[in-house]
Amino acid sequence: MVHKVLFWGGFGIAVRVWQLGLEMRPFFNTGSLWAYPLFAGVGGSFGYWLMGVEQRQQAILGARRASLLEKRARRAEREAAEAES
């Protein structure tokens, strides 16, 4: 789970490097080093939020799968009872 936060934090840093590359500014200017942790933090926050979204979706899908399997079992039971009659 931590890999998502680390990935998106790294993505935030990559966005900052890309931004500075587009502006043709130096990557390690002393006055703008504060932006790297900011971009990494924003990216990491997005990754953390995305991780929560994925967990909620997995819970919903798991509940839906369980209800479908239960429904199929009841249907198979009913069809087996009808076949015996």
Image (tube, helix red, strand yellow):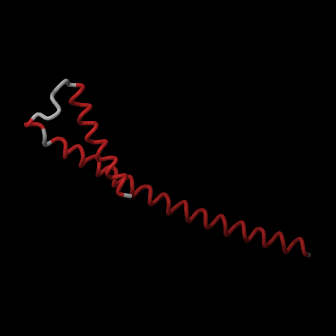
Where is 84 relative to 6, above or below? below
x, y percentage for residue 22? 24, 25
Looking at the image, which residue sits at the far right? 85
Which quadrant is home to the N terminus? bottom left
Looking at the image, which residue sits at the far left? 31
Which quadrant is home to the C terminus? bottom right
x, y percentage for residue 33? 13, 40
The residue at 24%/46% (across/down) is 40
x, y percentage for residue 76? 78, 68
Q: Nearer the viewer, residue 21 or 56?
A: 21
The residue at 67%/66% (across/down) is 69
Where is 63 relative to 20, above or below? below
The residue at 73%/71% (across/down) is 74
The residue at 34%/47% (across/down) is 7
**Which of the 4 image quadrants contains residue 18?**
top left
x, y percentage for residue 45? 29, 52
Q: Nearer the viewer, residue 58 or 33?
A: 33
Q: Nearer the viewer, residue 65 or 39?
A: 39
Tell how many labels. Answer: 0
Where is 48 relative to 31, above or below? below
**Which of the 4 image quadrants contains residue 66?**
bottom right
Question: Is residue 12 rendered to the left or right of residue 58?
Answer: left
Question: Is residue 74 rendered to the left or right of residue 59?
Answer: right
